[in-house]
Amino acid sequence: MGVDVGGTKILGVAVDPAEPNVIVHERKVATPAGGAAALLAAIEDLVTSLSPDCLALGIGAAGLVDLDGVLRYGPNLPGAIEVDFKHRLAHVAPAIAVDNDNTCATWAEFRIGAGAGASDGVFVGLGTGLGAGIVAAGAIVRGAHGFAGEAGHMIVQPGGVECVCGRFGCWERYASGAALARMAQETVAAGRGLAFMATAATAADIRGEDVTRAFRAGDRDAAEVVDTMAGWTAQGLAILIGLLDPAVIVLGGGVTEELGEDLSRRVASRVPEFLMGAAFRPPVPVRPAVLGNRAAAHGAVLLALDELS
Ligand SMILES: [Zn+2]
């Protein structure tokens, strides 16, 4: 089984080990308030209800997960600090793998999704925030402590927009659903962007979804906001391309699900202006993810099965 532990929901998926690429059961529950104990109880309940004799359990958690399977810090999981998933759930399954949720999504997309076949690649999930993962020489890159791939908090604009991490100018403030919302609010403050207000009572209520919906309806202000975000996305990707020389970039997350190729095409077209020697290197394809919001849970179970073999 694979479990994706997010800030608002916990998704569990079950696969048959003989055919792990196919999800046979799934169930979603709301993430409980009440800290680590409530979180662990909810996961245990989910696992036993979906798969009473679970052979291998993979957990993808939103936050910093170390190499021992401990969630050190999960800013979107209230009270979840120093949660030792691996030991506290040991009675639920004989084999347990725990990773960051984006690491799990990365593995799924590069094993069976949009990046399949590439041995070097980068996954960037554009959701409420921005999470990323790295595959190099066919393996997930975890770093010395398990924290590799935290690209969302690379500072791309010193002194820029304040971030949830307490610093200023992080990439995810410029490339995410939250970034779309902020840019749309700025458009409204400048006296434009009427389409963003279709379901929002005030400008402060505008969400990323209001922008993607207006974009799909052909709104010009929305196209401008999406173009701006695509440029910022490309700027961060160029840093990762310079550093890692990937064969392919996979864009995932809810924003990409809404915008698909309209976004990936715009992003790909902007990368060269930020990349050293772009004219002398093959362009790196930017592809939308294909596994949707099951990627992290599915990748978690694939990683757990890897531990068994
Ligand atoms: Zn940050």
Image: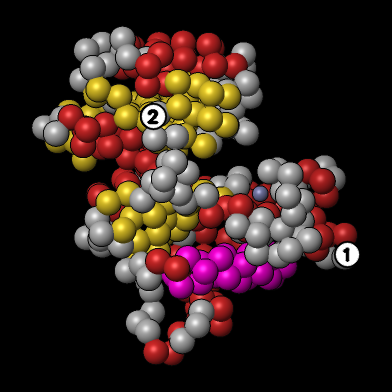
Question: Residue 187, image x and y in percent?
Answer: 80, 63
- Amino acid type at circle 1 is Gly
Hey, which quadrant is residue 55 in on the image? top left
Q: Give the range drawn in magenta.
A: 220-242
Principal SS element in the magenta part?
A: helix
At x 45% / y 49%, what residue is drawn?
A: 148
Hey, which quadrant is residue 16 in on the image? top left
Question: Dot 1 corresponds to which residue?
Answer: 191
At x 46% / y 15%, what residue is drawn?
A: 40
Which of the labelled discs sits on residue 37, or is there none? none
Magenta stretch: residue 307 in it? Answer: no
> Which quarter shows the N terminus?
top left
* Element at label 2: loop
Task: Answer with mark 2 or mark 1, whichever residue precedes in sequence.
Answer: 2
Question: Dot 2 corresponds to which residue?
Answer: 68
Q: Does the residue labelled 1 lie within 8 Å of ligand 1?
A: no
Q: In this picture, is 259 found above or below 221?
A: above
Question: Residue 110, image x and y in percent?
Answer: 29, 53
* Element at label 1: loop
Taking the image as shown, residue 242 lies to the left or right of residue 93, namely right
Q: In this picture, is 117 found above or below 220?
A: above
Question: Residue 176, image x and y in percent?
Answer: 61, 53
